[in-house]
Amino acid sequence: MTKNTKTILLSLLACLLLITGFELGEGRIRFGGAILSDSLPYRMTINKGLKVNGALTSTDTITTTGIFRTTELQMTGASPMIYWTTYGMNIDGSIDALNYNSNAHSFNTEYGTVIGYIDSASGVSSYLPGYSNNGRGLLKRKVVQSTLGGTTPGNYINVAHGLSSLTKIIEFSAVVYDDSAAQLIRQGFNVSTGQSTGHGFFLDATNCKWFIPATSGNLKNAGDTIRWSITYIE
């Protein structure tokens, strides 16, 4: 290649760079108004948004200080996870399980009204349907119990339910575990032993109460238990 040919080619390349606005400098590539720069120690920067028409693949973390928008989010791998490091919450999708980790879970309508709530103290709570005319009530459940060891038939069993207002109780059920007879006895139990004669399961402002009649047979053994399940509103 002659010297004149080289000069002509270099001149054409310079003209092309000027026409396209392409600039190659120290650690910087310029395409028109877009500048790709090696300005940070561990990453490149660009002064414009970036649109990729094909697949975008990363073998490391993708970090954004703004909103991450996508029409579909697919998470693959043995244990995919959505994780909030600031608040200590995460959604962990392991094989055959989806685990939500948080101190409490609140399920809200789009307007912010809580329709369900889960925490370790109260378990699963939900709002009572149709109760909004009297003030929305968050339904909760509480279990109280007492053993019958040393209890004399013909007396009351009293167990404090710990609820501040009796009027907030929606319903309750009671069962007796007759360990000696291997029987689970509900309210209204009636067999020939006469264990239901005179039974009374009820609640007052302070206690869950059960009157054990004198004909209740063996219902005073150490292994026997009375248990109430109470549904109430917060």
Image: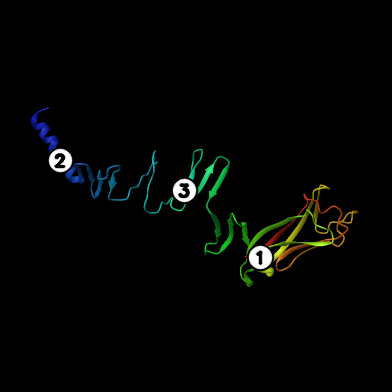
Residue that carries the numbered disc 2 in the rendered image? 14
Q: Categorize mark 1 by other alpha carbons within 10 Å: few (<14), some (14-19), many (20+).
A: some
Q: Nearer the viewer, mark 1 or mark 3?
A: 1
Which of the numbered marks, if any, corresponds to residue 163? 1
Mark 1 or mark 3: whose residue is earlier in sequence: 3
Coordinates of residue 100 in the picture (x, y in percent): 54, 49
Residue that carries the numbered disc 3 in the rendered image? 83
Q: Categorize mark 2 by other alpha carbons within 10 Å: few (<14), some (14-19), many (20+).
A: few
51 and 164: which is toward the camera: 164
Rounded to the nearest angstrom, the CA distance separating label 2 from label 1 is: 86 Å
Residue plotted at (66% across, 65% down): 163
Which of the numbered marks, if any, corresponds to residue 19? none
Residue plotted at (64% across, 60% down): 140
Mark 2 or mark 1: whose residue is earlier in sequence: 2
Query: Which quadrant would the C terminus be assigned to in this image?
Result: bottom right
Q: Which color mode does the image show? A: rainbow
Looking at the image, residue 136 lies above or below residue 60? below
Identify residue type, mark 2.
Answer: Ala
Mark 3 or mark 2: whose residue is earlier in sequence: 2
Q: Are marks 1 and 3 in contact (CB under 8 Å)?
A: no
186 and 112: which is toward the camera: 186
Q: Quadrant of residue 201?
A: bottom right
Please, which residue is most extreme toward the left here?
4
> Is 131 on the left-hand or right-hand side of 32?
right
Asked whether the viewer can see residue 73, the reply is no
> Is 108 on the left-hand or right-hand side of 140?
left
Coordinates of residue 58 in the picture (x, y in percent): 38, 40
Q: Categorize mark 3 by other alpha carbons within 10 Å: few (<14), some (14-19), many (20+).
A: few
183 and 72: which is toward the camera: 183
Coordinates of residue 63 in the picture (x, y in percent): 37, 47
Q: Nearer the viewer, mark 2 or mark 1?
A: 1
Looking at the image, residue 57 lies above or below residue 217? above
